[in-house]
Image (cartoon, coloured by chain):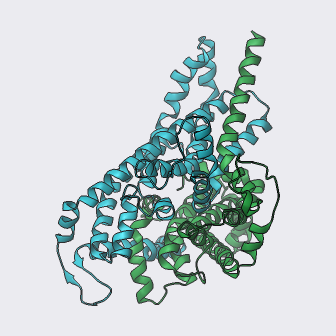
Chain colours: A green, B cyan
Amino acid sequence: MIRQFRLASILRTFTMLILTAVLLFPVLWMISTSLKPIMGIFSVPPHLIPQHFSLSGYRTILNDSRWLHYFYNSYFIACSVTLLCLVVGTLAAYGFSRMKIGARGPLLYATLVMQMFPGVVLIVPYFELAKTLHLFNTYGVLIMADTSFVLPFTIWMLKSYLDNVPTEIESAAMIDGCSRLQAVTRVVVPLMAPSFVAVGTWAFLGAWNEYMFAVTLTTGWQRAPATVGLGEFFGEFGINWNSVMATGTLSSIPLMIIFIFLQRYLVRGMTVGAVK
Amino acid sequence: MRRRFRKRAEGYLYILPAYTLLALVTGYPVIRIVGMSLSSFSFQTDHTRWAGLSEFSAVLASRSFWSSASITIEFTVFSLILHAVIAWVLALLMYGSREARWVTNLFRGLWILPWLFSTAAAALMWGLLYNPFGVLNYTLVNTGMLQEPIDFLGRSGTALGALVNVNVWRTYPIYFVLLLGAMQSVPDSLLEAARIEGASYFKELRYVVVPFVWPAVLTMTLLDFITTFGHFDLVKMMTGGGPQGSTQTLAFYIYREAFLSANFSYSAAVSVLMFAFLSIFSVAYLKAYTRSNVI
């Protein structure tokens, strides 16, 4: 009986390992290719561990000033969207969680619908808006466009978090002479710090990965984020796959940092507000 | 009385910035797209004229619209099936695991990793694997499964499947995490009762766990349908709708008609039809969401 149980457990762990290897193979292959010299990319037979290591792929990309722009744009847009949505979202979440709002149900459901809205429906009106307001190819229009899908889940997640924060502490602060706004900034906001990390991570990831709005509302490398630059590799003739994979690896660095340090927040976020 | 009014108004003051923004970035564009679909619109002439439902009848009479619609359905259905298969396999493996906590946490972390990569990065990873000289072709040819290397993205028979595969690879983690979360929230009392009754592992799954997680699975599937149906990124990056239109999903069709053919009103009409179709699913989703409360 015991032996049978052990056998099943070993089999299970073995299956888990094999599946992990299969699922993560594309990632390993990307990193491996980024470290190969051009001649070694399509070697026969293929080698997961490069026979010769070379950083020429990384060198090509880091010497290309366009990629500095692409990455800077990605960071700038993602950070702005995160900040904007956290500030505005916290206010809204506080309103929903603590105040009397008549249209609360309909508004919250409308937000839930917006969250899963097919973004492609918005691109033509955005394009028109960008043209008439002279916002085409600016950070502003991309930040706005990203807000359309980041803000709804920010509101939902922050609200569900605030609902679990007891009201006694802020009431006490208000009895002690704080105004409501002071109570919010001095008592509620510090209490919410963990949820800011969780929601902020989600907001950042959403904006960092966004491609559709970026590709329709920008042109050239001056304002476009890295996703657009990555997408452009496909059209090129005779791609240097080692520098392409180096770029892919570099663009994944913030995601890996998030993965290593903030994983448990991510998992919680996934279960609170199911997101695209 | 007056005080109560002030209190009410104060609540709205807190949500005002957020909903002003949302009205601008979602509300206005939705109204505008409906307006565009009912008029003949062009960026060259400011002159816009009312066109009634003529664009809609043009869309519904067009063969490319219906072929895009069926490609979209194919893309969505296959993605959903594969999501479900992978998520159930992984969640069941983990659910029955009696390994130490840190081992299961490590596996869970590694299994959600693909979701963290941007769609663009995933597209490039798989673009390299799909290459005619790439490692996938090498393996398939050497194990005898293929006669000669094929260009997965360049053939109308394989391109859509190749895109489905990349999409599934990047998005299965959401399904997996939600499913595992639902499975782990089955109350212990239910499981104990089943064990006292002498239920085997499989009976426990069949009669306790699956019925418990079913509402959550339905909710997830609806959400998955809605988001996958509007998928755009991989098509734009990897195939551009080709070869021979075999990967032209509705989202890409909307983009192509607007930005490559400058048929803005036509594109708007397709958008409105897609939106109307998905609204049915959105309503179903809201109902399922309020009922299940698990997600």
Question: From what the image shows, is residue A178 above or below residue A130?
Answer: above
Left or right: residue A217 compared with residue B262: right
Relative depth, front residue between B116 and A57: A57
Residue at (22%, 78%) from the top-left corner?
B39
Residue at (57%, 71%) from the top-left corner?
A228
Residue at (43%, 77%) from the top-left corner?
A126
Q: Across the whole image, how many numbered discs are drawn on residues?
A: 0
Relative depth, front residue between B195 and A205: A205
Rendered image quadrant of residue A84: bottom right
Left or right: residue A235 compared with residue A37: left
Residue B113 x, y percent position in the rendering:
67, 50
Question: From what the image shows, is residue A56 above or below residue B83?
Answer: below
Rendered image quadrant of residue A253: bottom right
Residue A116 x, y percent position in the rendering:
46, 58
**Residue at the outermost top position:** A1
Rendered image quadrant of residue B144: top right
Task: Tell me if residue A67 can be seen.
Answer: yes
Residue B56 x, y percent position in the rendering:
21, 66
Relative depth, front residue between B180 and B23: B180
Q: Quadrant of the N terminus of chain A?
A: top right
Task: Tell me if residue B12 can be seen.
Answer: no
Question: From what the image shows, is residue A140 above or below residue A57?
Answer: below
Residue B286 x, y percent position in the rendering:
41, 50
